[in-house]
Each structure stands twice: as C-alpha cells, then as structure tokens.
Amino acid sequence: MATKKKQTPNLQNDSWVVIAADSVIDTQKNDSDPAFVRLRNPSTDAASLYMLSSGDVQLFEVKAFEEDFHSWFVGQTVQRDGRLLFLTPMDPLYLILPYLMTSGKEGKFQPVDQVVMDEEFPACSRLLSLTRSLAFLHHIAEEKEVGKLKFHRYNQEKTMNWLKKKVERTVAMLKARSISVGEGVKSITYIRVKSDSDYHEEDYLRYAHGLISQYLSEDLSKALLDHLQLPELTSPKETEPPSKKRKLSDKPVEAGEDYTKFNSADFVRKPSKKMTAAQKSLAKVDKTGMKTMSSFFSPKAKAENK
Amino acid sequence: MSCNTSVTRVDVSSVGQAQRAPVHLLPCEIEHNGPAQVSQYLTATTKDCKLEKTVSFRGRGLKGQELSCPQGYTGLVLKEINKPGSDQEDRTVKVSSVFDKLTYWNLETPPNSDDTIVMAMDWPELAEAIHGPVED
C-alpha cells in the first residue's frame, strides 16, 4: 500500500450531503421540524443517530455511505467531507424490542410507556408516538386490556415469526433485484449479477438474515438463525481472500499512488479506520455510532469476528 | 453522555429558499471547505459523450456519470449556520441546496453498475424490504 499523506482533521465541517425520503421534508400536517436524535442502537447498544419526523410520526435511519478520498462540489463550493448520508424510513419495533425484552424477563404485563424508558437516551420515549409503534406491538408482544389500559409482555415466538417475515420480504427483494449473495461477496459489497441461478435458497436466507441482524442483539440474531433452521457457520471460507473473487477493475495502476485504492476491490472496507480519527473531531451530527454503508453490506462480518 | 439529550433540528421551511445546485462527487479528498470556481474549471470543460462524461481535473482524466436520486427521494445539502458553544445545546441545520441528480467521477475507470455509489442508490429499496410493515 502506498504511503499515505498526513491529513489534517476536518474541523470546520458544517455541511452534509443527504439523500432523504420525501416524507422527511413534508411537514404540512405539523408545525414542528424533523430532528436528528440519538437513540440506543439495538445491535451495538451504543448511541446511533436517527431522525424523528415532524410531529414524531415517522422514524428514519441515518446511514452514511463513505469511500476513502472523496469530496463534493456543491454549486460553487467545495465540501471536503465526501460522505453521502441516506435518510430512509425505519421500523421502530427494532428499537423498541430491546426494552420490551429486558422488561419481559420479569414475566409481567406492563404499560409500554413504563418500559420504553432510558435515562441515557431520553428521546426513546418519543418512539411510542410513531404511527408504526403501538399499532404493531402485537408482532413482538402479547397484549392485555384492562379497562382502557393496555399492557404488554414480550413474546419470543411472536417476535421470531415477525422477524422471519422480515427475512422473507428481504429475500424476495434480493431475488427480484438479482443482487448477488454468494460467498466472497460479503466482504466487498453487494453486486449485481446477470443470472442468479447459481445461488441457493440458503444463500439468500443467510444474506437476508445478516441484513436483518444489523438491527438485532447478538442473542436475538442467533435465535433467528435457529428459527430459520440455518446451522451456524464455522466459516472455513476465511482462507479464501475475498479480493480474489472479483475486482472492480483490473486496470493496472501506477505504483506509489494513493489512487490504487480506487481500483482495488477492498477499498470499501477501509473507512472505519479513517473515520475514527477524523470523526472524533467532527461535528456531532454526523458521527455517533453511524455505520458505514459498506459495513452494512457485509452481513456476516459480525458472526465471523468471533 | 449528556450529549445524547441534545437534538439537531432540520429547519424545513428553508427548503423553499434552497437553490438547485449541481452536485459532483470527486474521486479525491480536497482539504478545504469553501468557495471554488467549479463552473469555470470543471463544468466548462466537461465533455458529454454517449456513455460517460469526461473532464481533465488537475491534469487527471476523470470519467463520470449522472445519477438520479431514487424514486421518492430528494437530495438535500444540510448546512449548520450557527454552531453552538457546547455539545449539550440543541442545534439547527438548514437546507442550503436541493438536487435530484448528482454527477460522480471516477479516476480513469469508466462508470459502471458496480461502482459503489451506483449500488448505494439501491439502499432505499433494500431498506424498504427490511423496514416495511409485515402482514399479520
């Protein structure tokens, strides 16, 4: 690898390029503005950035797509930070689930507003206002009504069935879009293939399971694997270099150039290294616990790191 | 930990005044934030061919392609006008520009469907599969 030029940290970053669902900027019904909030990430248990829409109606996930050595031109200005952020609608049940599971250990039916509370992340109680929260709690919990009051208790079997449907939806989408899910793809990113007949149902299931697991605790991810009747992998494929499988380009590049990264298939795995140093000094809105796009598309990385 | 309580508001009313700006993603890091003569030195010399755009930027040949935002999505450039003094204060960002397509540039490599930015545009559809409501 070429020696890297020392870089100055990007301290003055004050703008972000975002691709947002149209509903983010649609505030006709409410007068409040949408806002970025920090909530507990169900997979990492640490803070991540999410967005609550105007009037706390809808939840959005914030995902950063990043490649090394990129910057933007916006109009007649340079923006050094070359990341592209996506704001996409998110199912709030993924975030509510850990709270219900914790309280479910007591085995009692409880009012959810007493369960979905977090001293560290006070915004989490706002999750219950979302249109897709209370109305869909029955996917993950038993309900009991006493008078006008509703009580809930976490239910593993319901949750597994709900998650299985999520996996099936995702499998259907992957097939429809002919997204490659085979071994060797995982550490690069996903790719399109012309024919998907090479892939087996199990490849799709595992891939979709990996995608969904980005929103689950480790235990729940394992339980889901069981529920899908997929044995845990002991990953003998580790020996195969992922870059061997495919390269984005086989064009020769001049030695000693930083730009080699653009032609090698593994450059998308790099951001985490660079991000940590730079991120610390960055303004808050764009850092906390956000996963990079590339980490998202390597669903099995979590399991293999063990 | 207290910074978890602060929120960053997006001033949506600013969308109305936001300009439509051409947006380019460049294959290099430019250690600068601020004005640049983009139309004079990049846009003016860009050649539009059938399959790709080409331009010479700082003596290097770039090959680029225009990408549209996914359906149902809008490109926004958010800008923070006043930075707060501490990390516990709430913050506000404005929408300074909007776009419905962007141009990304590769160094030498012709743009193709395996480019990571092209694949990133599939993310909203994949997210819909993962996050859309499931039936009972």
Image: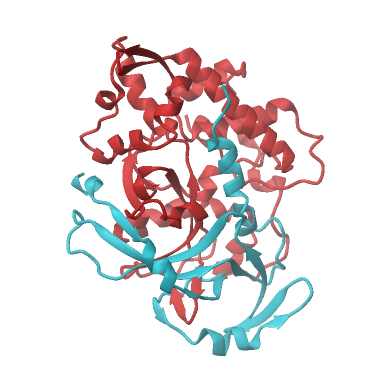
Q: Residue A110 in the image: x percent, y percent?
A: 28, 16
Q: Quadrant of residue A211?
A: top right
> Looking at the image, which residue sits at the far top?
A107
Q: Is residue B77 left or right of residue A114?
A: right
**Nearest the eye: B64 or A69:** B64
The vertical placement of B71 against A118, above or below, is below
Is any part of residue A209 visible from this angle? yes
The vertical placement of B54 against A3, above or below, is below
**Image quadrant occupied by the N terminus of chain A:** bottom right
**Nearest the eye: A93 or A232:** A93
Q: Residue A254 in the image: x percent, y percent?
A: 65, 71
Q: Residue A266 in the image: x percent, y percent?
A: 59, 52
Is any part of residue A277 visible from this angle? no
The vertical placement of B59 against A180, above or below, is below
Q: Quadrant of residue A78?
A: bottom left
Look at chain A in the picture and name its colour.
red
Look at chain B in the picture and name its colour.
cyan
Q: Residue B108 in the image: x percent, y percent?
A: 68, 72
Q: Residue at x 69, y 78 (%)?
A: B54
